[in-house]
Image (cartoon, rainbow, N blue to C red):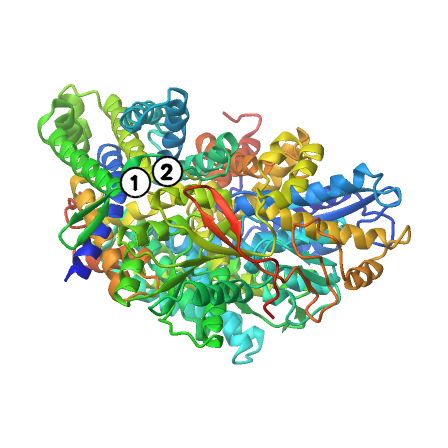
Amino acid sequence: MDYFANLVASGLIFGSLYGLIAIGFAVIYKTTGVVNFAQGEVMMFVLYFSWMVGTFVAAPLWLLLLIAIVVGGAFGALLERVFIRPMIGQSQFSIIMTTVGVAIVLRGLVPIFWGVESEPIDAPLKSQLYEFGPVMMLGDQIFALALFVAISAAAWAFFRFSRVGVAMRAAAHDETAALLMGINVRRLQGLSWMIASAVSGVAGVCYALIVARAPDMWQIGFQAFPAAILGGLDSPLGSAFGAVVVGIAASLSEGYIGYGLKEISGFVIIIAVLMVRPYGLFGEKELERV
Amino acid sequence: MKALTYVALALCLGTPAMAQTPGVTDTEIVLGAVLPMSGPASFPGLGASAGSRLAIAEYNAKGGIHGRTVRMLVEDDGYVPSRAYQGLVKLADDGILALVGTSGGGSLGAMLPVIDEKKIPTMVSTSVSNAAVEPVRPYVFMLGADYEDMFFAQIKYISEHDKPEGPYAVIAQDDDYGAHVEAGVMMAVEKLGLPSVPPVRFKRGQKDFSAEILRLRSQGIGALAVGGVIAETPGVLKELAKLRMNIPTAHAHTGAIDMTARLSAPYNMAYYAADYVVPIASEAAAGFRDLARQHLGEEEQKSLNRFSLTGYLGTKAVLAAAEACGRELTRDCLNDNLKKIDALDSGGLSSPLDFTNDRNTAAREVQIVRVNPMENTVEPLTGFVSYR
Amino acid sequence: MRTGHAVETYGRLLALTTNPITWAWAGALVAALVALPWAVSGHLLVVSTTVLIATVGVVGLNVLTGTTGLISLGQSGFLAIGGYACGLLIRDLSLPTELAVPLAGLITGTLSLLIGVPSLRLKGLYLAITTLAASLIVIHIILYAEPLTGGPFGLRIPDVSFLGLRIADGRGMYYIALIVAVLTVVFVNNLMRSRSGRAWIALRDHDIAAKSMGIDLVRYKLLSFFVSSSIVGVAGALMALQLRFITADVFGLFLSIEALAMLLVGGVGSVAGAILGAAFIVLLPEIARGLLALVGWTGETGSAHVFEIRAVVTGVLIIVMLRIEPDGLIGIWRRTKRYWLQWPLSV
């Protein structure tokens, strides 16, 4: 039993990382209908930049987190303005491919500016051991998990209760009606990118804490896809939930089956789920008029 | 229209050197290297390239080789075999005397058909691969102990000094490098008659090992061999520390790099590593570091790492063999002289280089070190010993 | 602009083109391609062969994504199946290459139905990610099925011949790729004008309307999957023949992304666009290398970041391409053609 419990707990950790990225992913998709293939790379770039700023001011961990949020927001706004806004009106396919291009560029820029070495974050949090019954967890893992829960809750509250959040939901649902109601849809799209990138910044800090700052950080952005698909691409909270499921499933499949199934178990699950629910667990069915 | 463009491009590239030996003109010797210079595997590639350039700079500073300056052309394969193939064809087009950088096992496998077809003298030093010497070719040479030796050494040491109580385990990544580590460990464990559990494989690039280590804990293992590159070592140690499993661990040559140690520092676990070259930060490599400061630019100095040592030694051997040919430099002469090298001084970086054996491989002697990340020390436990 | 040319027989209606000038140009292009290996050798020949193989792959992808509108990220998985199938058929079953290549394609097509059937209900991005998932699972199986595929140690293909052309010979491999590419392009062009082709276009534009017009969605979707993946499988087989040594790394995910880039940059939905896109993306690293060499940055001049800069340039060029010409390279071609046809009265 404690084998199972530990596996689940471990799954939660990386599930949190995937979840933070998946939330960003879903926010952008929900508001603009764009799939941001560069989400992992954005996380990496924001982290590297924030790290640079943070080292300059000798920032402790909590300050680094704040810097990452600010840098993320700014960077997201920049990306949207420079790469996405001019592509309005183009096919979704083209916009997605543009994000792929952005991903390639960011991936190449990081080693150019900051080198190829991996750097750890020096925080005592990393080696503090906590025991919850049979389950063992390290301080940095709990930190990431806590942040994930906080941000998921914040996302839920934002979209449910705040004016801007409700406006975003409205714009996603029916853009024309939203425009008629006086909502500045273009500005909302920029805002969605800002939020997504800020959350990615947080994800980056958590990742750098748990693993390290390295030029291959973008690879976990990959697992955000099954997470978001599982929960429904247009549901940030669903995506967060999906990420947790993916993380736990990965852990369990490795613990009980093996064969390196961990990294692809998320993808196996979504095939199974999509066969039953073609729009993910919590996604909304897209209605088409003939 | 397309044809015209190609014709124009072909003419623009110019005709290759008029000399009969590719890569050799009256004034120049051109070497080639195919290395991962970008992407996730760029750490070894950049290091190897810098090391090779150092060897070349050392010779050029002495006036070149019989009046010829040495140059090196590098193609980036990004650790993808198809790009390695393409890169080597380009190098062969451009005209190289020999290939001194061969990237990983998969890339080497893709390049071997071209190497065999054009009989390009090749020094495999970036990563050890059995395919290079099975079968042995008179123009392919290798530098380095294979993973079986590296892990046999460590497992033997662990069984004699730590005497673990549980079975031995290996966790390795799922590419050819990891597969070789896995095979090496299992062979070693069998040869020494030690108990073991089935090997565990993880996807290359994976960062989270919690489930894998949990499973190994449930099997009650007493020692663990890790077949990762750099980030996997701290990843595994982290999980061991979390579960309070204070068992001896054996790592590949990358375990002794200071980056690996730095990443592992928070977890309070010392570990073993083995290599066929000394750690680059050690006393024994002080001469190498001085040489680098003398001859390399600032940016290249920053890319120096453990793989620079192997790149340096491999290229140095090739250049020494070329020098022994005098002005009449041909590929056959180069191959013959390489084969004759039986005690090339490596400056203390490894055991003296000897290619006269039946595998065309030098520096097969392994040194075990104990890495203490908390104090940032790398303590050699043995000299360079042969485990054949 | 041709006017006054009425079609008088069914034969002329069904023909790819009735314009003798078009045939002449097509013939000239093929002749130039046949003559290429005599003008060019070594590296450029390998690149040209890669362009031809990529063409086959992208033309295949176009059937599924461009024409039927089913976005697929599964390219790398299908290429892998085709490559490994071909390699295993040649190495272990000693099948002649002429049989192994099309058989590898058919095997890929059949296996693709395994993902085609579950995907019937999926739309847009959900479909794309499902194909991505399938691709990852395929590569994973190849990596772990060591007794069959050699696992991480890869698969080596012996030096065989295809219609008398040796695959180890640069020229021989080029001609093999050229023959397959020409056959594929002719085949797909004809297919697009057939009933299936029109059904696929209807599916893409509006599947519910198509269904109400009597087009069987299930049948045509699956047919699209089958045909597309078979062609991609053939491309994978060609890759295996060119490299003579394949591992799972050769078929990494970047191939799926690259294939979509080729499709988009060339112009979605058109075969000619697929060809142009394939050529562009394959040549892009060479273009980047050339551009940087102009500024004096080569792999030799010590700047360790040249290679990353090349990658960045590649990404930038893709973004710029998508920005300035959303219809892709074929859109540029068509606009230019129209301009000169109407000149001096062009707008």
Residue B24 sits above or below residue B359 on the image: above
Front-most of residues B209 and C216: B209
Front-most of residues B87 and B296: B296
Depth check, mark 2 against mark 1: the one in front is 1
| Amino acid type indicated by mark 1 | Lys
Residue B69: name its quadrant: top right
Residue A6: name its quadrant: bottom left
Front-most of residues C317 and B205: B205
Q: Which residue is mark 1?
A: A126
Q: Position of residue C115 (x, y in %)?
A: 31, 62
Pointer 2 indicates a residue of which chain?
Answer: A
Q: Position of residue B108 (x, y in %)?
A: 60, 59
Q: Position of residue A126 (x, y in %)?
A: 30, 40
Residue A38's tag is 2
Q: Going by the picture, which residue comes out furthest to the left?
A: A161
Residue C25 sits above or below residue C314 on the image: below
Q: Going by the picture, which residue comes out furthest to the bottom?
A: C93
Q: In the image, A31: left or right of C30?
A: left
Marks 2 and 1 sit apart, C-alpha to C-alpha, by 29 Å
Q: In the image, A261: left or right of B346?
A: left
